[in-house]
Amino acid sequence: MMSETTLPALDHLELDRGIVLIGLMGAGKSSVGRRLAKRLDLPFSDADQEIEKAADCTIEEIFARHGEAAFRAGERRVIGRLLDGPPQVLATGGGAFMDRETRAAISEKGISIWLRADLDVLLERVLRRDNRPLLKQGDPEQILRRLMAERDPVYAQADLTVTSGQGPHEDVVEDIVEALQRHLAGGSTDADLKDGD
């Protein structure tokens, strides 16, 4: 394990690409992303909000009017545009990384960080809001369980993995910063970064 003295200082992180947060709905991508962007003095973008601006309607309306395939195509275009810009912190929708083309663009132009959370944490968070189209198709717990089974193996392809648990989002930000420092120093393996270690 690398000692703290060999890690680049936070204000010396040389980012030539954006940081892309991936994970299931409720993992904290937007909340953590805003705090991380502030900590790193980078702009923050929420892909879902950018998609809504581009489409001039809500994601729920896009799903209802045009279906998930049309939404994913728009999402792919918006994320591609954002990745072509200067480095920033980008929070993506839960299904974005599942799209092969989007995943390839993120891999090429960003540092992907999977915010991994347990089912109980996800369920508690998503039930606070009523704007999750995929959860309106049945029992939220069963849907999240199915999504975890389908998506976790793909999310595991991310450059870094950090656990998003019950604690404050600031703790997750600190874990991300440490993981980024190690990653940029080139001294850690993926296994070193699991669970925010």
Image (cartoon, rainbow, N blue to C red):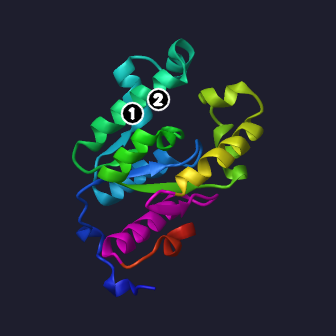
Closer to us: 166 or 55: 55
Distance in Å between CA atoms under marks 2 and 1: 6 Å
Three-letter amino acid code at the position of disc 1: Arg
On the rendered structure, is 91 left or right of 135? left
Asked whether 104 or 32 is in front, the reply is 104
Residue 110: x %, y % from top left: 33, 53
Q: Using the image, determine if residue 74 lies above or below residue 44.
A: above
Instruction: Please tell me whether mark 2 sits on a helix, a strand or a loop.
Output: helix
Residue 149 in view, yes or no = yes
- Relative to residue 108, is residue 74 depicted above or below? above
Query: Which label number is shown at residue 72?
Result: 2
Q: Are marks 2 and 1 in contact (CB under 8 Å)?
A: yes
**Residue 86, percent from left and from top:** 22, 47
Seen at 36% across and 24% down, the residue is 53
Residue 138 in the figure: left or right of residue 194: right
Q: Residue at x 54, y 19 (%)?
A: 67
Q: Position of residue 126 (x, y in %)?
A: 64, 39
Residue at the spot 51% in from the left edge and 62% down from the top edge = 161
The amino acid pointed to by label 2 is Arg
What are the residue bounds of the magenta stretch? 157-186
Disc number placed over residue 76 in the picture, else none: 1
In magenta segment, residue 124:
no
Q: Is residue 185 left or right of residue 115?
A: left
Q: Is residue 99 above or below residue 172?
A: above
Residue 128 percent location from the top left of the image: 66, 37
